[in-house]
Image (cartoon, rainbow, N blue to C red):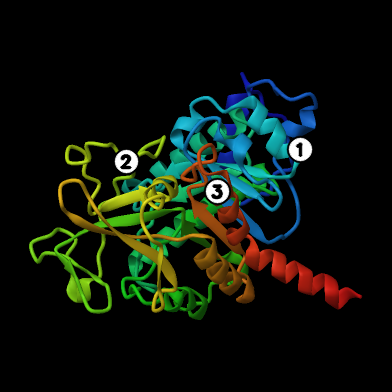
């Protein structure tokens, strides 16, 4: 069938509409309207590899990618700041190593009951991915909808339409969705949340479990016998059993806590791993046997006591081993830019080692069994 088109953008839109309306599977073409900045045009095509364990990094700062450990990295999700002007060197470097680049996009909640809006969103999103020579999208929502509810089904249907369109236009592309932990996920363990998705029928090879390279800094009115931070009842983070949900206010690069910290109080907010390393210069790391994570207490110049709970190489190894031991698809991290690669290179390197520990152990066992 011959189709008259005015430009390549029209071609993408027409192809997506054909897929959405008829369910046709389109053969591969290169619908991008921008020139390839790489030496080889093949590096501007979506990475098309078979199933593999995933190590997913979320990138939020420009030019930090040169500090990453690319040994096991398979997918890099680019934030809005990155997408405004994708670094051509990053594009060529990543694709040369079969690392996918995904665009971080916000889930259009307003389109959940409107298929016309969904169709427009899908067409525009695919065009953006094509223009930037990317490999798919990561849909950010992090909301938890009770499995089996009407709202959960609507989300699944919307995502399925998006996946069908992407895979038809870009074979090998990825469409990933940031699902939240279930509401009953507690401080002691979130493994039940993972199991709830598996029990609902989600294949383990579709689950990637994201880990934090940041911690939470809590202002404490005191400490319990077991060294738990006691939070005032009127605190916005105060919940039953002192389990807290802090506001997500991340300290910014270069991750140095101001000397006059009374004017910049990140209490009850999150703190990057780089800032954690900075504080640990003068404070003692401790270990929570219940959560299997590190923490430390410190006193500010204002006289306030704080407790910082976070993840480091030791706790990440345990989580990585669990994830790959459960044969899940892989592990991710928010965000690979929260390490301080300049001031704390050893600590930053240890985070990557902890993140991929379970994968390396699994690959070693597989190699051993082949002999």
Seen from this angle, which residue lies furthest right?
371
- Foreground of the two, 291 or 8: 291
Which of marks 3 and 1 precedes in the sequence? Answer: 1
* Residue that badge 2 annotates: 257
Q: Residue at x 62, y 57 (%)?
A: 353
Numbered disc in front, either 1 or 3: 3
The answer, for residue 34, to whether it is visible in the render is yes
Could you tell whether 231 is left or right of 115 in the image?
left
Q: Can you identify the residue that label 3 sits on? A: 348
Q: Secondary structure at mark 3?
A: helix
Looking at this view, is 154 or 363 the one in front?
363
Q: Nearer the viewer, mark 2 or mark 1?
A: 2
- Residue that appears at 34% across and 62% down: 296
Determine which quarter of the picture holds residue 134. top right
Q: Residues within 10 Å of mark 3 (few under 14, many from 20)?
A: many
Which residue, given by chain and number where applicable, does mark 1 sit on? 96
Circles 2, 1 touching at the beta carbon (< 8 Å)? no
Query: As drawn, is 319 to the left or to the right of 90?
Result: left
């Amino acid at each position: 069938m011959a189709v008259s088109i005015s430009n390549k953008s029209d071609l993408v839109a027409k192809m997506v509409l054909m897929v959405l309306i008829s369910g046709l599977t389109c053969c591969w073409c290169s619908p991008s309207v921008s020139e390839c900045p790489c030496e080889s045009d093949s590096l501007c095509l979506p990475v098309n590899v078979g199933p593999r364990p995933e190590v997913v990094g979320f990138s939020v700062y420009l030019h930090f990618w040169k500090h990453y450990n690319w040994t096991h990295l398979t997918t890099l999700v680019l934030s809005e700041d990155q997408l405004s002007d994708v670094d051509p060197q990053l594009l060529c470097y990543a694709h040369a190593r079969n690392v996918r680049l995904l665009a971080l996009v916000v889930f259009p909640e307003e389109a959940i009951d409107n298929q016309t809006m969904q169709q427009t969103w899908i067409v525009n999103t695919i065009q953006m991915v094509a223009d930037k020579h990317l490999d798919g999208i990561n849909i950010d929502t992090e909301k938890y909808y009770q499995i089996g509810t009407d709202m959960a089904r609507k989300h699944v249907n919307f995502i399925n339409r998006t996946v069908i369109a992407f895979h038809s236009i870009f074979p090998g592309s990825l469409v990933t969705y940031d699902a939240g932990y279930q509401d009953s996920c507690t401080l002691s363990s979130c493994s039940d949340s993972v199991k709830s998705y598996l029990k609902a029928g989600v294949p383990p090879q579709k689950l990637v479990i994201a880990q934090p390279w940041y911690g939470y800094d809590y202002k404490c009115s005191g400490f319990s016998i077991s060294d738990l931070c006691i939070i005032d009842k009127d605190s916005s983070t105060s919940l039953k059993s002192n389990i807290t949900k802090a506001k997500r206010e991340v300290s910014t690069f270069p991750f140095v806590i101001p000397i006059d910290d009374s004017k910049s109080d990140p209490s009850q907010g999150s703190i990057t791993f780089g800032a954690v390393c900075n504080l640990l210069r003068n404070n003692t790391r401790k270990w929570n046997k219940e959560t299997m994570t590190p923490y430390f207490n410190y006193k500010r110049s204002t006289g306030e006591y704080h407790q910082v709970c976070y993840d480091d190489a030791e706790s990440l190894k345990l989580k990585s081993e669990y994830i790959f031991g459960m044969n899940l698809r892989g592990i991710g991290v928010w965000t690979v830019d929260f390490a301080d690669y300049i001031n704390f290179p050893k600590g930053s390197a240890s985070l990557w080692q902890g993140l991929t520990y379970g994968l390396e152990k699994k690959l070693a066992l597989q190699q051993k069994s082949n002999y």
